[in-house]
Amino acid sequence: MPVPADYLRYPHRSRGMDHDRYEWSILFRRKPVDWPGGARVALLVVPALEWFPLDMTGKPFRAPGGLERPYPDYRYYTSRDYGNRVGVFRVMEVLDDLGIRASVAMNSAVAERHPFLVREVTRRGWEVVAHGVHMDRLHYGGLAVDQERQQVRESVGTLRRLSGQPVTGWLSPARSESDNTLDLVAAEGIEYVCDWVNDDMPYPIRTAHGPIYAMPHSHEIDDRVILLDLHHTEAEFVEQVCDQFDGLYREAGRHGGRIMAITLHPWVIGQPYRVRPLREALSHVMRHAGVWSATGAEILAAFRAQA
Amino acid sequence: MKSDPGLYDYWPYVDRPTLTWPNGARVAFWVAPNIEFYELAPPVNPVWKGVWARPVPDVQAYSHRDYGNRAGVWRMMEAMDRYAVRGSVSLNVALCDHHPEIIEACAARGWEFFSHGIYNTRFTYDMSREQEREIIEDSKRSIKEHTGQDLAGWLAPALTNTEHTMDLLAECGLKYTCDLFHDDQPLPVKVRSGRLISLPYSLEMNDIIVYSYYFGTPRHYRDVLRAQFDQLYAEGARSGTVMCIPLHPFLVGQPHRVEAFAEALEYITSHDGVWVTTGREIADWYYAHHYDAVAAAIAARAGA
């Protein structure tokens, strides 16, 4: 049996993308962006505060960091919970010392379970980014739209109520979306989304409720990916953060302001032996002139003002 | 099924009551070798079937583990002797019957024995309360008979737990569990009756995690142990911390790995303010000096 004839038809075979969410655009052929104060690089640090329920189903797939053993998996549950109890405070100390304000991607379940953490984030002037409900409530192709709308509303509504912030940024748990996710978050007033990893700068995305923006959020400069997936050492983590920064910093001299996004998980980087490497990496960034530590919403505002 | 274990309250690692250790030490340092016996042909647990990756007999995996008892543990013991570090043995208690020479050698050094179940190939999944109580009581009897010690601590076999495990440990008079990884300090565990604390054991400092999950080199393991110590030692100036090195003799006791481990021990024990101790001693100290104050502080916070 050969493949059906349709298999050799290409209905989207034309210039640009094979969908209409965003335009094809080359990073190096855009109008240069100026950051406030003439900064070359905007530093966007995004720690994730996540909750992996003990009874998680892992459906339709297990989010990275999800529980692996039969119920009750105290081993992985408590190892992840460590980040919200202990690790996050080590990360906060490093960022405070270096004068860095973060944008915290927070499951709304974390905010409900730990109002103390919400206060620790907001009193620092850090931004709360909606990160879904929890790590077993995924958004994915095939999820009923009413169910997904309820998840978006629960996440955004809870985080707005508990943080007192407008909450205009969104990161899907496991960076997973359905075809409806962008429309649903835009309907709730979300202005930027961190799921798409195809650019180093913001770009507009079409939704049923008007345009929103994709915001760089690194899946490469990510503690969990580098240390746990790729099994690189802590020293190699530091090297890669520094190299990423150096590359962007150089590039900004010719192409205009850039964004350096760093993705952190306190249950990973907040382990005692990993805190000094984090400090080393971020110290390298912050000792340069022309670095603007900013939140996602601030970066978006500066970007939009010139768009 | 519960979405939260219900074993502890949220307790952020800031503004806690200060923990003190004997002689003003900053870090309570303990080493927990897992001395294990893996069965060649274990029965299959209905919930979790995977003991061996290959059909029985899985010669390479079985003999790799067995290396620990024949060769590795003796080399590891020698390295610990050099720096006067006593072990707290996480023991598959059937090993008392299989390899009494190892038990005698550890006991002669004044090491502690806590239980890691009967065999690492017998998981607790689907055990009734009575069955799980039976393995705890078997552990108490076996360790008492072979070492004269009263069992104080528990690390579930292969880290398999049931919803009843913590209640049963407390009912059977045990003092501490190593199965919770939520904190760097000992903490009360909520149990139905009696008292139980979680003692910081560690996945991250565990040789099996570094070697077999992260695929680290021996020198990397040494560096990680030192870095962990440096941070906990620095934090220990504010309030006492605990550092545990969990080991597996079949890994750490390989000739190419044991000296890197010894170098880490040399580094850690060369510092002032390090209480080189055992699990039982940390638990006893904690119950005597901190348990009540911490439990009260957590309760006050939960009510606030």
Image (cartoon, coloured by chain):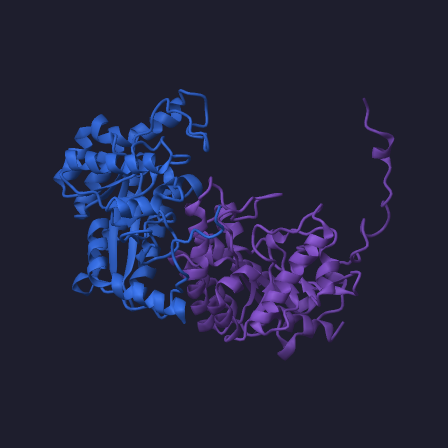
Quadrant in the picture for residue B98: top left
Residue B33 screen position, x and y as percent:
27, 41
Res. B269 in view: no
Asked if residue B292 lies left or right of residue A257, the reply is left
Residue B274 screen position, x and y as percent:
22, 58
Res. A100 in view: yes
Asked if residue B65 lies left or right of residue A259, the reply is left
Q: Nearer the viewer, residue B54 or A116?
A: A116
| Residue drawn at 41 percent across, 72 percent down | B304
Quick one: which residue is furthest to the bottom in this view?
A: A37
Q: Which chain is purple?
A: A
Quadrant in the picture for residue A262: bottom right
How many numbered circles are shown?
0
Q: Nearer the viewer, residue B211 or B126?
A: B126
| Residue drawn at 44 percent across, 68 percent down | A94
Residue B299 screen position, x and y as percent:
35, 66
Q: Nearer the viewer, residue A251 or A119?
A: A119
Residue B46 screen position, x and y as percent:
45, 29
Q: Which chain is blue?
A: B
Q: Nearer the viewer, residue B16 or B140?
A: B140
Quadrant in the picture for residue A72: top left
Asked if residue A158 lies left or right of residue B289, the reply is right
